[in-house]
Amino acid sequence: MRLLNETPLWLRLITAAVATWRLSSLFVHEDGPGDVFRKIRDVFGVYILGDDDRPVSQLGRLLACVWCLSVWIALVMTVVMLMPIWFVMIPFALSAIAIWIEHTFESRWP
């Protein structure tokens, strides 16, 4: 555990950046296990659209846009990154890297 707390800030920053994208993408684009993320979007009104084909509620608009949501998730990740428990971001960062690898090499496999 001591080694994790001695991790350089630059590595924590990269981990936080990749985890921020992954969490933003999960909430905006994916259904998740048991449709948990779809249900969250439903509760916050992502699918209730106005005349302009945008969600009516502010939270619905937030959860419909990766760019918008990533700002708020990044604020949380900044706090987490500076705490001794920063390593909770690692699974999300690893997931994002795995997705990148899959998209990069999926058409190259026989």
Image (cartoon, rainbow, N blue to C red):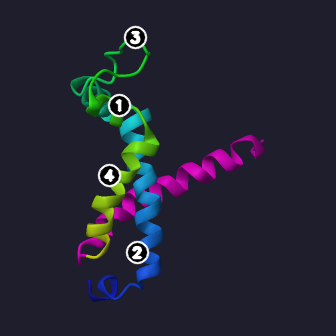
Tell me if residue 26 comes above or below residue 91 in the rendering: above
Give the residue pinned by disc 1: 61
Range covered by the magenta-colored residues = 83-110
Rounded to the nearest angstrom, the CA distance separating label 2 from label 4 is 18 Å
Identify which amino acid the numbered label 2 is placed on: Arg
Q: Amino acid at mark 3?
A: Asp
Q: Where is mark 4, residue-wise?
A: 72
Front one among 42 and 93: 42
Residue type indicated by callout 4: Trp
Residue 30, compared with residue 15, is above or below; it is above
Element marked by disc 1: helix
Q: Earlier in the sequence, mark 2 or mark 4?
A: 2
- Callout 1 crowding tier (Cα within 10 Å): few <14, some 14–19, many ≥20: many
Question: Measured from the top left, where is residue 35 in percent x and y?
Answer: 31, 28
**Residue shown at 41% from the left, 58% from the top:** 19
Q: What separation in Å lies between label 4 and label 3 (alpha carbons)?
A: 27 Å
Q: Circle 2 sits on which residue?
A: 12
* Badge 4 density bin: few <14, some 14–19, many ≥20, Cα 10 Å: some
Which of the 4 image quarters holds residue 85? Answer: bottom left
